[in-house]
Amino acid sequence: MARASTRPRLVLTAEEKSHLDQLRQSKTAPFRDVQRAQILWRYHAGETVSQIARALKTTRKSVLKWIDKTLQIGAKVGMKDTPHQPREAVITDDAKAWVVNLACCKPKQFGYAAELWTRSALARHVRGNAVEAGYPALAHAAKSTVQRILDAQALRPHKVTYYLERRDPNFLSKMKDVLLVYQEVALQNEAALNGAPQPIVITVSVDEKPGVQAIGNTAPDLPPVAGEYPTVGRDHEYIRYGTWSILAALDLHNGHVTARVEERHRSVEFIALLQDLHAYYPPEATIRLILDNHSAQISKETRAYLATRPNRFKYVLTPTHGSWLNIVETLFGKMTRTFLRQIRVTSREELKARILLGIAEINEMPVVHRWKAFEALEAAAEAV
């Protein structure tokens, strides 16, 4: 038979009972305060220490701590943590700086195979080398300790953020040339809304979308079923038939797209696109092309064709690695969103036909693509 407890009963005033009852049922108070209120309420109701510990899934030691403290100094004060002086930091600023320096180095510099640190690997290296480096306080540093040190410096050595180095020494001046063209086009389009005639110089944005894959299903798609299957069902295996490249020219005045779907992007394919543009636009107009430095566009064969059409075409080249300055990239994004993503075909020829059909649908409802970030023009003008 269990020995009866000699610990006195907890006597509460009406105010204390009301406070504990409200706190023990709170959904917004801190968990520790709610748990302490439940301990005292249950003890006041006559439950034993063991019963309270089992009900609240805690230890007898924790239950006794708050009961004894409340019996000594009352419920309101007894539930609070005892004020204490914070201990002086064991891990010095020098030790933290050492950890930060390690995080800013690559693991391979210390003989590891990994390219980037993980928190576990960095913590393991810190523990293994702390004493030798003169920081014994870090000899038992846990992963969480290392993470707190990194968080204080906003370091994420396990992540990669990509950037693009400017390898073109004339990047800013070329960017300025492209943006000035966009600014001129914006003024021409605004004038056209007020009844101005078509400009003599027609600006077209040209680029290639390579590697569009012709992918086929190994089993038929399953259509959605209302109330049962909300999405299209598709077998995870697929067949590769090959790829196509899309050569596209986007008219920046009316949104019309002139495009070809080719196996490759050589001079012969680019010249074919130029011929399409030549046939589409009025003979008296100058066609200004915004394009990159692809070899097919400045090859001997291409220049020979351009020589047969003097003053018909005018190039404006984007900087090296500056394809984001070419508005036609937004057209390729639209193609991907509207009909290329998730497309399945039975052959390469079907994919080509559907790409041309999608371009025809875009031309039925053309959208004028505009450049709006002209603040970059001011930065370029200051730097040039």
Image (cartoon, helix red, strand yellow):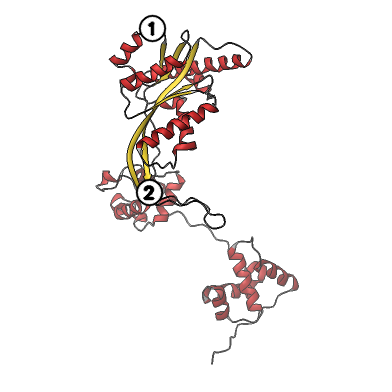
Viewer-nearest of discs 2 and 1: 1
Image position of 90 (left or right of 239):
right
**Residue closest to the eye, 106 or 292:** 292
Q: Label 1's element?
A: loop
Between discs 2 and 1, the one toward the N terminus: 2
Can see residue 256? yes
Report the residue at 53% width, 19% height from top.
253
Q: Which quadrant holds residue 166?
A: top left
For this orientation, the residue located farthest to the left is 111
Counting every numbered tag in the picture gives 2
* Residue at the disc numbered 1: 310
* Residue at the disc numbered 2: 95
Report the residue at 66% width, 78% height from top.
44
Residue 269 lies, with reference to residue 129, above or below; the image says above
Residue 17 lies, with reference to residue 220, above or below; the image says below
Q: Which quadrant holds residue 215?
A: top left
- Mark 2 → mark 1, Cα distance in angstroms: 71 Å
Image position of 271 (left or right of 283):
left
Report the residue at 48% width, 19% height from top.
179
The x, y position of residue 104, in whole percent, is 35, 42
Can see residue 80? no
Which corner quadrant holds the C terminus? Answer: top left
Crowding at mark 1 (Cα within 10 Å: few <14, some 14-19, many 20+): few
